Amino acid sequence: MPIDHDEQHPVLPDKEDREQRGTNPPGSFGHTDPPSGDLAPGWQPNNGNRDDAEGLIKEIGREHRPRREDVYPYLMIRAYSPGDRGARPTWPGIPCWESPDILLIDAAYTGPFTTSQLVVSPTAGRRYRVFVRVWNLGLLPAIGVHVRAWYVNPGFFGGDPNNPAYQPVMIGGAMVNLDDRTRPGAAQVVELDQTWDIPAGLTGHECLMASASCPLDQWGGALDANHDRHVGQRNLTILAGTDDAKQLLFTLGELVTRTGTLELRHGGAAALPMLRGVVGRAKGEIRTARLREPPLKTLRQGVTVGDTQHLLTMFRTEKGWLVADSARLWKVALELGIAKDDPERHPFATPLGSRRVIERIGLDRSQGFGVLIEGHPGEALVEGIARLWQLDGLDARGLAVALAGGTRYAHLLRFAHTEPEREESGGYSLVVLAR
């Protein structure tokens, strides 16, 4: 006979239900009345507990939050070589405009990519195939990577698209898929769909820019190699022997703004690693195996600042353009007690440091460490270098010999421009070889 559950468990009135349940039913401990939810009289929040909890949450988040490259694609075009892993910014300290991942081959060569055909100093009026080496340092493949490249007027482009002196011109683009970083296909050399046809009216010293972007790791849109690993920049010219450097120096000089400062540093031992990154190890236009890095102590110009040599400073004054020799400037500063001889923290090590020393000394003493030249800034840089270094000509050999003896040294000259009004800085590198 079926059991009638309603008869076994009748619904009791509220009074009988309370009487049967009681306030301490079997198996319970203590009082069972639910809390009212009201705060106790005089209760105050404990901020210490809150701060401890927030600290614990942040600590756990740091411990367990994965790195971006372990979850998504992590695209990069190197800013410098060797050692670039994508940390930005690099400058000041390490130039961001010496990318080894933007490469040129003369269009007369139609074969596959090879470092033996690389062109390090393009010529106006010629046509070049453009290649970009792109890296994926993430553990997820990068699908649909859009690679593009531009050229910009030679100078100190720092990514500001509103600067009329530097307007990027598109060269071309290409699409590619990259494997994750555990596979060989994580890095690929990509050829653009268009060649770079350099108009005869250009110099051939133009800056080259490249970007890489994919749906899961997108480029932000600014051509700022110093703050974005998706962007590479190559502001580099290599001159040897009788190659004329005067036109390039004039061009760089005329781009120094009225409120800006140009500083020239010697890269020292960084010259050969940079050259190997650009030209490869195969026999090409330049045979790096025959070159040597000049020890800083052998340089005839400048003052040693860390692992570089500070050579010159140029800026506009009320009396004209001042081009100051760093070695003479430092000597005057020490004689006047304006700067201490502290090799661990040299005043010239940071941008504008040499200018601040000059301003403390005063222009009335400028004849002791530099030359004042009225007129065009391009002429000022050319004439200033020629006079301070006692040069008759400004070809590559003359500059190399003025810097150090020996014909096998590779001299890396880094021109860095700082514009405080635009809050912008940029640079251009010149390698000079005696032969």
Image (cartoon, rainbow, N blue to C red):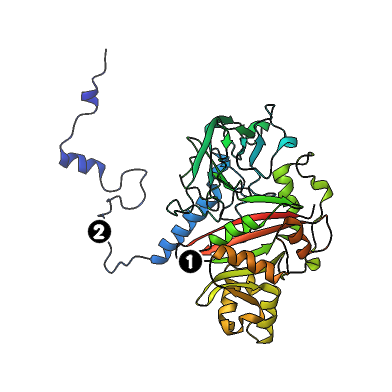
Question: From this viewpoint, is residue 91 visible?
Answer: no
Report the side of 407 relative to 359 (left or right). right
Residue 180 position in % (x across, y down): 61, 34
The three-letter code of the residue at mark 1 reads Pro
Question: From this viewpoint, is residue 377 visible?
Answer: yes
Residue 175 position in % (x across, y down): 54, 30
Q: Is mark 1 on a helix, strand or loop?
A: loop
Given residues 399 and 137, the one toward you in this image is 399
Residue 125 position in % (x across, y down): 60, 39
* Residue at the bottom extreme of this rendering: 336
Pointer 2 with pointer 1, Cβ within 8 A: no
Between disc 2 and disc 1, whose residue precedes?
Answer: 2
The three-letter code of the residue at mark 2 reads Asp
For residue 246, above or below residue 217 = below
Binning the other alpha carbons within 10 Å of mark 1 as few (below 14), some (14 to 19) or many (20 upward) gives few
Binning the other alpha carbons within 10 Å of mark 2 as few (below 14), some (14 to 19) or many (20 upward) gives few
Given residues 101 and 71, the one toward you in this image is 101
**Residue drawn at the location 48% of the way across and 54% of the way down:** 165
**In this figure, which residue is indicated by the disc labeled 1?**
420
For residue 213, above or below residue 59 = above
Residue 174 position in % (x across, y down): 54, 31
Q: Residue 135 sits in which quadrant?
A: top right
**Residue drawn at the location 35% of the way across and 46% of the way down:** 28
Mark 2–mark 1 Cα distance, whole angstroms, equals 60 Å
**In this figure, which residue is indicated by the disc labeled 2?**
38
Tag in front: 2 or 1: 1
Given residues 32 and 84, the one toward you in this image is 84
Q: In which quarter of the image is the N terminus?
A: top left
For residue 237, above or below residue 311 = above
